[in-house]
Image (spheres, rainbow, N blue to C red):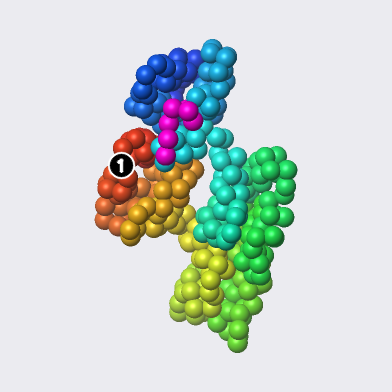
Amino acid sequence: MEIPTVNPLAHCDPSSDASVLRKAMKGFGTDEAAIIGVLSHRSSDQRQQILLKYQQGYGRDLVKDLKSELSGKFEEAILALMTPLPLYLAQELHHAMQGIGTNERTLVEILCTRDNQSLMAIKNAYHHHYRKKLEDDLRGDTSGDFRRLLISMCACSRDETNCDPALAPNLAQQLYKAGVGKVGTDEAEFNRILSTYSYPMLRLVFDEYKKIKGKSFGDALDSELSGDLKLGMMAVYDCIQNRAAYFAKELHDSMAGMGTRDRALIRLVVSRCEIDMGNIKQEYHKMYSKSLEHAIKNDTSGDLKKLLIGMVEG
């Protein structure tokens, strides 16, 4: 069961919330705590209602006002919250492909971990906002087997329900023959199987694979693949096994070592808090023997820290 940490507020009054935000930004200085108090405890839909009530009540654009009052990473996080999730993730994909070089890790995190409905919403938002097809931009920005994996995910047509245990041994054999059981790797077969069948079906296939090989399919991916394709296929594999654990690891990596990958940290918290952040927190604690809140407190500061903790604590 998925456990969000940010839930729609019962008896939400968007007009009163708009009034709190207006007061927080009027006059000299900004009351960041009031802004955090409202925006970190409302659902995405409720934040969109506040936006409309702010315009209705004051004839002003809430996003523009927030932009003029805030700065830095805190501003980035607040603007992420004020953007409907599919559009926000479409913008993050666009940013990952902009300029010189591509942030493959972002492409993988967004495209290889979501269900058909979420992916379709992101694709539609991308097309509407940029007047271009997401697939076309991916084709222009990635290549080879990695490109094929991402384009496969964009088909948004994974079977999400069927699970026939009788098929599992045969599919496991197909995976074995495409990888460890031959010289070289048939990446296309890996791609076909990982992008077509339901998660419950693939879990059975992976169990069968382990019986044949004595090693997990994850080990096979690790030894058979390299580079971006390995990054993408491992993300698909990890999400099938335990999606919350995959996101816990991504959160951990965004804060590991020197400096924080703030953009990734913000995106992970904003995009998962209304879905399964409760599960991710449990996995994080299991994997790293400390709470996610503790890690965020140690790694961020100021208003950004307060906002992220507000959303993660729930």
Q: Which residue is mark 1?
A: 301
Name the quarter where the N terminus is drawn. Answer: top left
Horizontal relation, residue 65 to residue 185: left or right: left
Residue count near mark 1 (Cα–Cα under 10 Å), binned few <14, some 14–19, many ≥20:
few
The part of the chain drawn in magenta is: 66-72
Q: Is residue 67 above or below residue 4?
A: above
Residue kind at label 1, given as amino acid type: Ser
Tell me which residue sits at (46%, 39%) in the image: 76
Along the line of sight, the residue nearer the viewer: 40 or 8: 40
Extreme residue in the front direction: 28
Q: Position of residue 9 (x, y in %)?
A: 44, 25
Total number of numbered discs in the rendering = 1
Tell me which residue sits at (48%, 61%) in the image: 238
Occupied quadrant, residue 309: top left
Extreme residue in the top direction: 57
Magenta stretch, overall SS: helix
Along the line of sight, the residue nearer the viewer: 165 or 205: 205
Q: Is residue 120 above or below residue 146?
A: above
Q: Is residue 267 above or below residue 175?
A: above
Q: Is residue 44 above or below residue 280?
A: above
Asked if residue 237 shows in the view, the reply is no
